[in-house]
Amino acid sequence: MEQKPPVEKNRIYIINITGQTHEGMGVGKIEGYTVFVEGAISGEKVRIKIVKVLKNYSYGKLLELIEASPFRVEPPCPIVKRCGGCQIQHMSYEGQLNYKTRVVKDAIERIGGLKDIVVHDTCGMEDPWYYRNKAQFPVGIKDGQIHIGFYASRSHEIIDTDVCMIQDKINDEVLELVRDFIKKYNINIYDENTGKGLIRHVMTRKGFKTGEVMVCIVINGDDMPHRNVLVETLKQNIIGLKTVVLNINKKNTNVIMGEQNEVIYGEGFIYDYIGEFKFKISPHSFFQVNPVQTEVLYNRALEHAGLTGKEIVIDAYCGIGTISLFLSKKAKKVYGVEIVGQAIEDAKANAKINGVENTEFILGESETVIPKLYQEGVKADVVVVDPPRKGCDEKLLKIICKMAPERVVYVSCNPSTLARDLKYLSERGYEVKEVQPVDQFPQTVHVESIILMTYCGSEGKK
């Protein structure tokens, strides 16, 4: 007979929170049965109400703190409980860094099966607020009112936002102007349920070192009425405005950006620096959102690469060439590989802007291009990978092991897929030397990590 869970829906319980998930939820046990509690912190004793019961676990709503964590703070943002942007603002910054270190360690041990790995304390920021250089705001209508902001957690309900404490402050000014423009000229707003309406998103980028600002309006159509008025308004009020772009997205999709851009002011891009390198950033460019921590991350990548000027380096998932250019300072040659065509064009332009001549950027899937390079006789001494959240394709990991570079530098934004890939490489001749989590995304559960692996066995050539 199947055992019944030891909790009932809508009943009140008192539990001790013994851990937190990678999504930030507190975890406790009732008679060995797992209960997840949003908003609870490891080490707390809480009173909860069970709101959902499943076979192996349940969800509880936090009702009362009986014993609070020393890392608990009052979130400064007034809409943090409704907005899905910041999941752990109720934790002190020290508590956030400790939590992220534990998440990375736990993934490497539990998923990767790797024990006694050196995982350094998460590298944090001096000021963990207003750090994002890019923001994407959905636009909608609710009860006849314009809502521009962020989606609520696990929904498409737009939480109207006047101020965001993790975005650059220029965004607040842009949103106010766009909101007034929509009202004044009665511009249609997109309804994702019907697929009708015009304005879908407002996207902004700011160069933190240059001060240059891009405003991109995502529309469900070919043009926007009174667009010249909006441009003039932005020019008069936004310090550093360099370009305004209409992005055309007429597909019924959750993907924010369409493929086509129409530049209605400026040149369609801005510039910013990471370290000594200058980068051209277009609407579709992948460019790390936290420039302060990105410099920390890339300097560590350069250090891990251990370059002397004689090495061939392959940079998989190279984006617009950010890491490639950093590595070019001390490498003989860097090959950057990226599947997004515009990113490759930007990478080539960025190399030219910076006078870098020892890089070559190739369009295509890393798992397809890199085996071809190997067949053509390119033997990398160092391979750097910075994949999307899904991690590396197994074909890429396979060719890395066959190529057997002395060092692999892995930059990851997802501890779970990182751990999976480290396990694969560790079983085929590579040793994880050290792991450095870097807090690219304060106030959120996301964490970036950079890992050095060295080749130590003939298995890598199989």
Image: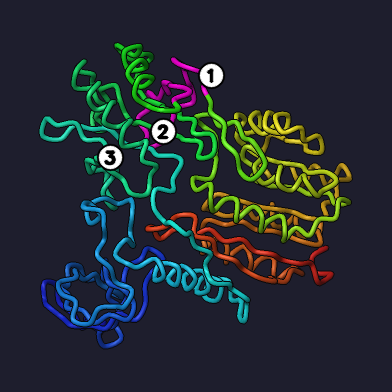
User: Upstream in the sequence, badge 3 or badge 1?
Assistant: 3
Vertical comparison of 322 with 182: above or below = below
Q: Which residue is mark 3?
A: 149
Residue 232 seen in the figure: yes
The residue sitting at 38% across, 37% down in the picture is: 136
Residue 462 seen in the figure: no
The residue sitting at 41% across, 36% down in the picture is: 255
Q: Amino acid at mark 2?
A: Thr
Q: Is residue 424 left or right of residue 98?
A: right
Q: How many marks?
A: 3
Q: Which residue is mark 1?
A: 267
**Residue 457 pos. (x, y %):** 82, 71
Q: Amino acid at mark 1?
A: Glu
Q: Which residue is mark 2?
A: 204
> In the rendered structure, which segment of residues is drawn in magenta?
241-268
Q: Amino acid at mark 3?
A: Gly
408 in magenta: no
Label 1 sits on a secondary structure element that is loop
Per the model, the C-alpha gap separating discs 1 and 2 is 15 Å
Label 2 sits on a secondary structure element that is strand
Quarter of the image for residue 428 reads bottom right
User: Upstream in the sequence, badge 1 or badge 2?
Assistant: 2
**Residue 144 pos. (x, y %):** 11, 30
**Residue 143 pos. (x, y %):** 10, 34
Q: Nearer the viewer, residue 420 or 137?
A: 137
Label 2 near label 1: C-beta < 8 Å? no
Farthest bottom residue in view: 31
